[in-house]
Image (cartoon, grey):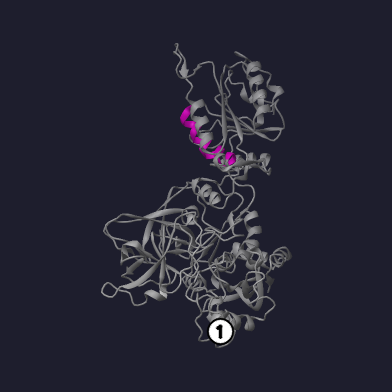
Amino acid sequence: MSNPPQPKGRDSIDRDSIDQDQFLTVLSREDALARFEAALFPQAPPSEMRSLADALGCALVQDVVAPIDVPPFDRANVDGLAVRSADLASASETAPVRLTLTGEAIACGVVPLKPVLSGTATSIATGGPMPRGADAVVMVEHSQPAGHRAIEVRRAASPGQYVSYAGSDIARGEALLRAGAVIGSREIGMLAACGIAEIPVARRPRVAVLSTGDELVQPGQPLRPAEIYDTNGTIVTAAITENGGEARFLGAIPDDEPQLESAMREALADNDMLVLSGGTSKGAGDVSHRVIARLGSPGIVAHGVALKPGKPLCLAVCDGKPVIILPGFPTSAMFTFHDMIVPVLRRMAGLPPRSDAKVTAKIPVRIASEPGRAEFVMVSLVEGDAGLIAYPSGKGSGAITSFAQADGFLRIDTLADQMPAGTEAEVTLFTPHVRVPDLVIVGSHCTGLDLVTAPLARAGLVVRSIAIGSLGGLAAAKRGECDFAPIHLFDEKTATYNAPYLADGLELVPGWRRMQGIVFRKGDKRFEGMSVQDAVRAALADPACIMVNRNQGAGTRILIDRLLGEARPDGYWNQPRSHNAVAAAVAQHRADWGMTIAPVADAANLGFIPLAEEHYDFALVTARKQRAAVRAFLDALASPESRAALTQAGFRPA
């Protein structure tokens, strides 16, 4: 059946020249958005290199890997004295221990020249590098002068007290940020700490904004009868900037078809997107949609959406560039912009979708607090069996990643001395677009883990890895707070790795093997060309030879203790928590030998004597085995690409 003839009025048009079926054929919101995105994507956002100062709010287009350890050396966390903790085992208020000052004062940027020998101490400032021989720092207020070049210490010190070890914040080779990460001040701080000056980011989409209507007057100009101020132009321009675009307001265009077409063509030629407001209805004076039909293929994909307000919305794609005509009323314009256009704009800018600013989450562990002060604790969010879990950051106040890698923070009241485990707390998000991770890995960290999860991130999955150690990971897995717990625990009774530590509901997934061995500076005759056993004997026979140990509970520590037996050589109580910190201590002459894995030794250009392969495996929560992200990780772990990447990095896939 043919359409009845249309009445002719002002600016009448030939309806036969336009496909009227697409105009004001009301679609559901989902159908309209699907048509719009199908016509526009996939297309990768254009990229550019930007300095850190210019990258704020941009999205990364490539993964960024740490080129150095942060901190790059062991450093003091407080002003005080660098000491040997063993010298102060008996120190107390009533029985202070007298130490001789070395005469050196270590400030930030000052390289220590004198070692801390037994019975001595060196003055050190916050951030100063630890001198050779020292394994702890005593706060200055816990000491008092005791004559010429002497000082009394009134409190005992534990190994590692007030010391940040090299690589304890960021390890060399660690994936700092994944492609798609949004650069904020926290991310900029973390990148700057690694010496990174510029990064590859998605170029902000250039978005032209045009207002249409004979009645529009720009703010600041006088109004005449029947005229209104153009509010849409300024509102839309600001909203574009808020959501990652580079907005360019081109003014208001009257309802003149040739003039409007010229302005629209010029705007599309110089920009990535065009947003107009007004001119979407079927009135005789509305010409924007007619112009779109001549600007490129496929043209209009939706004209009329089942939204209230916002029904007259018009969506088009012209030769790969989106063109949007928002309703004229400001309320309708902004509702449709945020609901329908912001998702597309953020995707073009490489940004994640928006989300709410506050969430409720369960705290899995007790958080101690100091009464008398309101405390804000930074947390990372994961999805547990019963809802959101908020893991508090545990790297300390000096760690950049404590701030950069958190999703938000929670508040502990002034009078409270703790937040008990199991508390339901409100988390304030740092950004409105935090996405709960698809895959949660909690336990021991390894740079090899980044190689396996990289394809998952490229596939759009969000992977959250929280490094709290093997035992902490097992506890989290038992509580159902993660999908995998990476572990490397040696059982002396069975002389096997990992399997004896599994509980009901967990199953072992083999990961890869990491060669453990003695690390030393190349050319050191005490170790060069030796077997592990001979090297340890040579080290024990030399009183001047200082070792660097690992923390209790680490798989590496178990191997070291088996080699040493009852011996406790100088440096035994120096216990950093990572392989990178061990390598840094040896490379920087604060120690002469230690135990680490081959890839870390190679990266630090140190000598290496192989001892044994450590099994780095995964405790899988069986109840989560069929989750899509879990299957994706298992597939990635078994893929030839990941196995090749692990092998190239110095690991041996299981």
Q: Position of residue 484 (x, y in %)?
A: 56, 68
Tell me: residue 442, above or below residue 236. below
Residue at which label 1 appears: 562
Q: Nearer the viewer, residue 125 or 435?
A: 125
Q: Is residue 125 left or right of residue 258?
A: left
Q: For the residue marked with disc 1, what is the amino acid?
A: Arg
Residue 331 falls inside the magenta stretch: yes
Residue farthest toward the front in the current orientation of the protein:
148
Q: What is the quadrant of the N terminus in the image? A: top right
Q: What is the quadrant of the C terminus in the image? A: bottom right
Residue 408 falls inside the magenta stretch: no
What SS does tag 1 mark?
helix
Q: Main secondary structure of the magenta part?
A: helix
Tell me: residue 330, above or below residue 285. below
Q: Position of residue 55 (x, y in %)?
A: 57, 41
Q: What span is in magenta? A: 329-345
Q: Is residue 489 at all visible to an observer of this figure?
A: yes
Label 1: few (<14), some (14–19) or many (≥20) C-alpha neighbours in 10 Å: few
- Rendered image quadrant of residue 450: bottom right
Q: Is residue 300 at all visible to an observer of this figure?
A: no
Q: Nearer the viewer, residue 8 or 405?
A: 405
Q: Nearer the viewer, residue 364 or 557?
A: 557
Q: Position of residue 259 (x, y in %)?
A: 64, 16
Residue farthest toward the bottom in the current orientation of the protein:
493
